[in-house]
Amino acid sequence: MLVLIDDARIEEIENLYDKYPYDGVTTNPSILKAAGHSPIEQLKMIRRILPPTSQLHVQVVSDQTDRMIQEAQFLMDHIGENIYIKVPVTEPGLRAIPRLVQQGIKVTATAIYTAMQAFMAAKAGASYAAPYVNRLDNMGADGVRVAKTIHDIFRVQGLKAEVLAASFKNSQQILDLCQHGIGAVTAAPDVLRALTYHDATFMAEENFTNDFYMLVNSVAGTHLHP
Ligand code: E4P
């Protein structure tokens, strides 16, 4: 399962990549707004700091098919390599997907709230479908279940598309999807940090280190400390 960072702030991305080799970055207009810089410059900067093998997902903002395609071409020409164009699964978006794919542009269908939206986007040629897990939970639906259903539909229908599950509030949602074989997840930095942090691990390491120094000091008569 690929694990991507759902954030556009350079410091956060660098900080996370410093600790772990993530698989890329996803953005949307709201995430770019939070970063607070010129969107295109920010996206170029993100692309520059990412390893070439890392994906960068960038969303179009137009609500008309032709303009979505123009935007996507502009982004492909200006940002760099390994770009996925995020297209909301509106009617104009679904019309844009096969035209983008014909031009060799990789598409992530986004703003997905139902399994059939994902199925139609995958049939249209999208590489990824991004269901919004936590937003679905907040609507009284079961976001994890929707994401799993989409994954199962893709496999049983022989579609090449993968789920790129998005919008998470906690690591349990990600664990459930990991266990189910989901292709990729993207989450905010705090959720990603919670995937690995555990107080007990921290305390175990501290105890081992203290024991080691107590042993060395008692054998050598020193007063060394970590
Ligand atoms: C990803 O495609 C979405 O833009 C994003 O993950 C939504 O997350 P949120 O519900 O936390 O805003």
Image: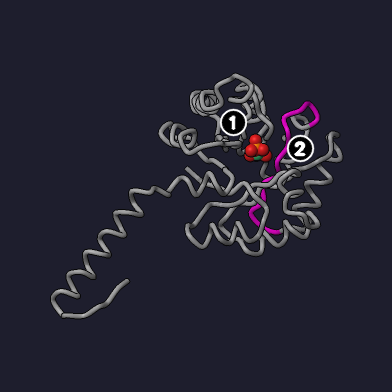
Quick one: SS at disc 2? helix
Q: Nearer the viewer, residue 45 or 94?
A: 45
Give how far across and how far down residue 121 sits, in percent.
66, 29
Picture quadrant of residue 47: bottom right
Residue located 51% across and 29% down the image: 151
- Amino acid type of disc 2? Arg
- Amino acid type of disc 1? Asn
Q: Is residue 89 magenta?
A: yes
10 Å crowding of disc 2: few (<14), some (14-19), many (20+):
some
In this picture, is 140 found above or below 96?
above
* The residue stretch that appears in magenta: 80-92
Q: Nearer the viewer, residue 214 or 158?
A: 214
Picture quadrant of residue 202: bottom left
Give how far across and how far down residue 59 sits, in percent.
73, 43
Residue located 78% across and 54% down the image: 39
Which quarter of the figure is the C terminus placed in? bottom left
Image quadrant of ligand 1 equals: top right
Looking at the image, tell me whether mark 2 or mark 1 is earlier in sequence order.
Answer: 2
| Residue that carries the numbered disc 2 in the rendered image | 99
10 Å crowding of disc 1: few (<14), some (14-19), many (20+):
many
Ligand 1 within 8 Å of the CB at mark 1: yes
Ligand 1 within 8 Å of the CB at mark 2: no
Picture quadrant of residue 9: bottom right
Give how far across and how far down residue 130 sits, in percent.
62, 34
| Residue that carries the numbered disc 1 in the rendered image | 134
Residue 145 showing in the rendered view: yes
Give how far across and how far down residue 111 sits, in percent.
69, 32
Residue 6 in the figure: left or right of residue 183: right
